[in-house]
Image (cartoon, rainbow, N blue to C red):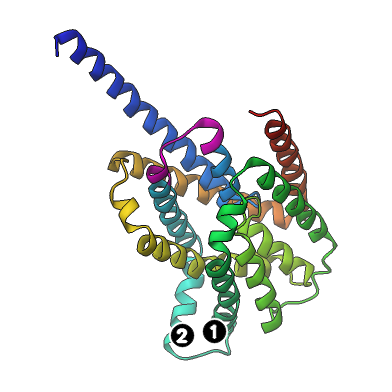
Amino acid sequence: MNLLSVTRKYKREKRRGLLGLVETAILGTIQGLTEWLPISSTGHLKVAEHFLHFLGTQDSLLFEFTLHIGTLLVVLFFFREDIKKILAALGRLDFKTEHGRLIPLIVIGTIPAVAIGFLLKELVEQAFQNMLSIALAFIVFGLVLYLSKTGKEEKDAIGYSTAIIIGIAEGLAIIPGISRSGATIAIALLSGIKREKAFKFSFLLSIPAIIGAIGYTAYKDYGALATAGLGWTEILVGIIVAMIVGFLAIKLLWKILAKKKFHFFALYCWLFGIALIAFSLSGF
C-alpha cells in the first residue's frame, strides 16, 4: 500500500469518526427530547435510523442500550429527593406516608407493564418495522393526548385500579409512536388524577421499567452488544447529550403540563404521523 493510499484511508477513517460523533450527538438529542416529552423516543429513533441510515444493526442496539442508561440517570437525578423519601419509607416498612403509599402503587403499576413488554416485544418489533405502521401509531396516540384535556383532575391520590391502568399504558408504550411518559400522564389525567401527581407518578413508575429494559437487553443481546463497533467516545457523547437534553426536557414538560397545554403535543404527533405516511407512500 503506497503513501497516497494510506493517506486516503486515514482521511476516510477520520471522516467516519467525526460522522460517528455527529450521529451520536444527534441521536442523543433525539433520545433526550423524545424520551420525556410525550412524542415517543422509540418512534423517533426508528425514523432517524431509517431515513439517515445511522449505524449498523449491532451499533444501533448498543447505542439505544447506552442511551437508556443516560435517561435512567436523568430521572434518578431529577427526582432524587422523592426517591430518597421512598427508600427511607421502604426501609421503615412505612406504607402510610405520602411517599410510602407510592411503593405498592409503583409495584402494582410495573407488573402489567413488564408482562406486556415480555409478551408482546417480539410481535411489536415485527409489526412496526415499516414507517407506515409507526405513522399510524403516532396518529392514534395523538388522539389519546388530545382527549387528556377532558380529565377532571379531582383526585389527589392514585388508587390501585388506576395504577394498574397506568401500568398497562406504560406497557403499550413499547409500540413505536406511543410515548411512555405521554401515555401514563394522559391516562392518569383521564382518570381524574391531578397533574402534579400524574407527572410525578409517571416518572417514578418509569424507573423500574427502564432498569428492567436495560437488564433484559443486556441478558438477551449480550453477544450483539459485545461485538458492536461503537467506541467509548461515541457512547459517552451520546449519554452526556441525552442526559443534558433530557433534564431540560423534563423541566419543559412540567411547565407545559402546569399551564394545561399538555394536549398540544397531539398536534405534533398528528403532523409527524402524516409526514411519515407521505414519505412512506412516496417510497422514500
Residue 222 visible to the viewer = yes
Indicate whether 83 appears above or below 15. Answer: below
Mark 2 neighbour class, 10 Å CA radius: few under 14, some 14 to 19, many 20 or more: some
Q: Give the range drawn in magenta.
A: 49-60
Rendered image: mark on residue 250: none
Q: What residue type is labelled 1?
A: Gly
Q: In which quarter of the image is residue 254?
A: bottom right
Q: Does the stretch in magenta take in 50?
A: yes
For label 2, the residue is 90
Residue drawn 62% across the image and 60% down it: 173
Q: Quadrant of the C terminus?
A: top right
Indicate whether 279 appears above or below 60. Answer: above
User: Contact (CB < 8 A) between labels 2 and 1?
Assistant: yes
Q: In which quarter of the image is residue 185?
A: bottom right
Residue 250 visible to the viewer = no
Q: Main secondary structure of the magenta part?
A: helix
Q: Where is residue 203 in the image (x, y as percent from the top left)?
A: 57, 64
Residue drawn 79% across the image and 60% down it: 148
Rendered image: mark on residue 100: 1
Q: Position of residue 138 (x, y in %)?
A: 71, 48
Q: Is residue 124 left or right of residue 162?
A: left
Q: Distance between the residues labelled 2 and 1?
A: 7 Å
Q: Where is residue 252 in the image (x, y as percent from the top left)?
A: 62, 49
Q: What element carries label 2?
A: helix
Q: Does the stretch in magenta take in 12?
A: no
Indicate whether 156 appears above or below 33. Answer: below
Work out whether residue 221 or residue 260 is closer to the camera in this orientation and state it.
221
Q: In which quarter of the image is the N terminus?
A: top left
Q: Where is residue 200 in the image (x, y as percent from the top left)?
A: 61, 67
Work out whether residue 95 or residue 136 is closer to the camera in this orientation and state it.
136
